[in-house]
Image (tube, rainbow, N blue to C red):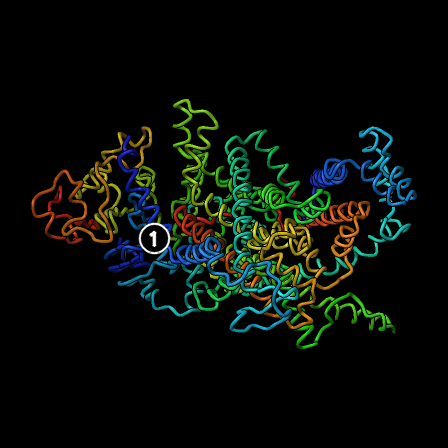
Amino acid sequence: MRGFSLKYVIKRFISAVFTLWIALTINFLLPRCMGGDPAEYLASQSAMGSLEYAELMKQQFGLDKSIFEQYILYLKELLHGNLGVSYMNFPTPVKDIILEAIPWTLLIVITSILISFALAWFLGTLSALKKGSFFDNAVVGTSFYIQSIPYFWVGMLIVMAFGYYLEWFPMGHAQDAAVTGGFLAQAGDIAYHAFLPVLSMVIVSLAGRMIMMRSNILQVFSEDYIVLAQAKGLKKGKILTKYALRNALLPSFTGLMLSLGQAVGGAIATELVFSYPGIGLTTMNAILSHDYPLIQGCFAIIAVSVVTLNFLADLIYPLIDPRVSLS
Amino acid sequence: MKKEKKQKSDSYLVLEKYLLKNTKAKIGIGIIVFFTLVAVFAPVIAPYEATQMDFVPWEAPSSEHWLGVNSYGQDIFSQVVYGTRVTISVGILAGLLTSFIGIFVGLLAGYKGGKTGEILMRIVDVFLVIPTLAFMIILAAFLPSMGIVNLIIIIGALNWLWMARSIRSQTLSEARREYVDAAKAQGMGTIEIMFKEILPNIIPVVTANMVMVVTQAMLTEATLSFLGLGDPSLISWGQMLSVSFDNNAILYNAWYWMLPPGFCIATLGFSFMLIGNSFLDIYANDRGGAVSL
Amino acid sequence: MEKEIILSVKDLCVEYQADRGAVHAVSGVSFDIHKGEFFGLAGESGCGKSTIAFSIMRLLKGAASITGGEINFRGKNVLMFGKEELRVFRWEKSSMVLQSAMNNLNPVVTIGSQLMDAILAHEAVSREEATKRAEKLLALVNIDSKRLKAYPHELSGGMRQRVVIAMALALKPDLVIFDEPTTALDVVVQYNIIRRIIQLKNEMGFAILFITHDLPLMLQMCDRIAIMYAGKMVEAAPVEELMKQPAHPYTSGLLQSFPSLLGPKVRLKGIEGSVPDLITPPPGCLFADRCFARKEDCRKKVPEFEKIGEGHYCACLHKLRG
């Protein structure tokens, strides 16, 4: 295994921090640029007779200070993990609500990404190997159609089919409170509830990845080193795994990094369909009840998770592509 | 300049290759024309007003109500027909906005290269990491109201990142060709070369991107509407799905309310994707390599 | 004088399916390569010379197919080989070096591992043994054996091409095909590599089929040269004879388009006109349009590829000699 240079790690780290900083700054600016100024909002809240809110708002946003001081305060609080207090569930800290929700989102996002990638690699390879066959055309055609379907609609159809008609799986939620018992029973219950949300996310994301993997393989097949590997009299399996697949996987790994954000976006709608208590459902509930600290907290945590996962993927990349560590 | 003389036949050849002999594109255009006609003649086609609430709620499809009646007593078929208008116009207008930004940034980053290109692409990469949909949701949540104009602007202004990337990589390889040097030698300016020389040469890739972002925009509109962030006064396919879900259409077994809007979104989106993809295929074949999107 | 013939190509025809019809990329080409011989195949790009190389290795892909003729290796027709026979023939009997120094090697696997793949696919040896062999192979092309663990991107273009050459010699084949092996490299590197190839050929005794559009380079090193034009062989002769007494107007034109062998190098572009359409080739001699010695019958009658001297063949109705 080749070590990756410190310089690479530092570079990726700086880039991750920079991205995060941009996202958090947007998060800070949005409520201040849009929808009038928070002070106005504050007043309206006070008018509703909730002086307690007003006091809290003042503290949270530091509204009596200049915008620059507010910004510094915001970043400082964030660094300490303080995301403020939720209005909706007053006085629960936003942090607690989010910490409860985020594992569910990560569970379905990461599981669906892994499954979808594995299937995409398999089907894409098969399709490329049988280029032009009925199988290939069917798979590619279907994929194109699926790519144009909204995430949430697939979710709705799946709930209707497997939850309502067939009653094979629960129509929503992440757990059954009635299931107690040991770790295994609970894990089984969680998997049982996660099945449909994951399935719906896999179906939609699989299509695009499959098409990409197929075209990567076809591209690699035309490279000279594949011709030479054939000329060398290597066995077909070896050419496919060591020479073609390894090279075709690399671009799709880059795709994986960039698709994390999209997957989280897809999860928001999916969670709503399945009443799945992740960060997406929390965000939507927060928006419905105008719980601004919670909305901001949700976006912050989504940004942090995606940037962190991306950074991890960046660290893995040099281990599979020898060209990266040096360039 | 021999080029002038051959111009006409050249552009005809291109037209022939990309449209007349391209079955996929013809199918795609056929579907789009169909939906456009439905949108234009909606008042003629729809048997009732889209908002008319005069019927028995939850009525299954019948000869009077081809796609049944929703929970408010509205005719679903009429809603689907009128919904075409909103979905197509949001898709195309937001797609155009996206294209303007995407083409400009892509060309500039690809042709200028150097510092400008580097910085532009850095920005693109940073924003690519941030989940676009989450960003839109937050934006929509903080906006005082969500009318169709805001919807178009939000979708259009945030979807251009992939497009800029694709056009940049195409421009990069194009910028190395001889005709660009020739144009430089003639003293043409950066903007002039970008739009007059490079753009016409990558038109297939640009067009492919332009039609594909329309699908993207329609999907985003549907999702935002579904999340309750669209304009509630508009009837779009996404809005219909949102209302059906909120009113427990699943538990009422109202498949006739949930299936048609979804199929319409998927089919119309598919048609744009089909056109875009066939253009890319032909272009890649001509250039002897794959084109990355 | 008469050495054993190891490769004999007879009436080879290859076609590509294009949108407008079949392209006759190679039509009726015949030639022999003797043991230990340095045989050159020259011609403009698109004349079908690389297609011949790929046909011999049976590596033609997709739209291309062999439509006629035989390729005999030591008396056995390569075109009739079964799967396993073909796998053994490839690399053990005949290996090849492709044009692009950049893409010949798998970018994500070490060069050592790629060298060893060639050995392990054909011989039942241990990994240690294969490693040792790979080290020796690198030494053959003057590369430090420590470089076994290097990835292709860590080597220069010239070094990469030397690795591929080492790989081609791994199983001591009878024939090594070089398809424009040095085109992408600069002149000094090119010179060094070619010199090394000749040394190795003399030491190990393999035959070479060397394909290039660089005629002056070829004149310096080949034993025998064949010239191709529009998918057909127009002339084949030992080097000195070809230089002194070219029989085909095309060969003569090519030779004259280089001011001097030691002067600046010019590519084969010195002849007016362009190659005929290979989908619907004109009747008669394909070179007629561009020929300075053209007579009336040239556009009607197809010239035979016939013997005109010791090892000298030519396809022309109005030869410049004989």
Q: Nearer the viewer, residue A8 or A1?
A: A8
Q: Left of A106 or right of it: where is C147?
A: left
In the rendered image, which quarter is residue C239 located in?
top left
> Residue C202: where, in percent of width, then height?
40, 47
Amino acid type of disc 1? Answer: Leu
B251 with respect to B100 (left or right) = right
Tag 1's secondary structure? helix
Number of numbered tags placed on the structure image: 1
**Looking at the rendering, which quadrant does residue A147 occupy?**
bottom right
Percent across and percent down for residue C100 are 44, 45
Q: Position of residue C219 (x, y in %)?
A: 30, 40
Question: Would residue A17 appear left or right of C217 to someone viewing this image?
Answer: right
Q: Which residue is mark 1?
A: B20
* Residue at far top of view: B187
Q: Residues within 10 Å of mark 1 (few under 14, many from 20)?
A: few
Residue lying at the far front of the rendered structure: B54
Residue A281 location, quadrant: bottom right
Front residue (pair C59, A113): A113
Please state, as top left, top right, bottom left or bottom right, where the N terminus of chain B lies in the image: top left
Q: Nearer the viewer, residue C91 or A71?
A: A71
Which one is in front, B21 or C143? B21
- Residue C147 seen in the current view: yes
Chain for mark 1? B
Residue A226 visible: no
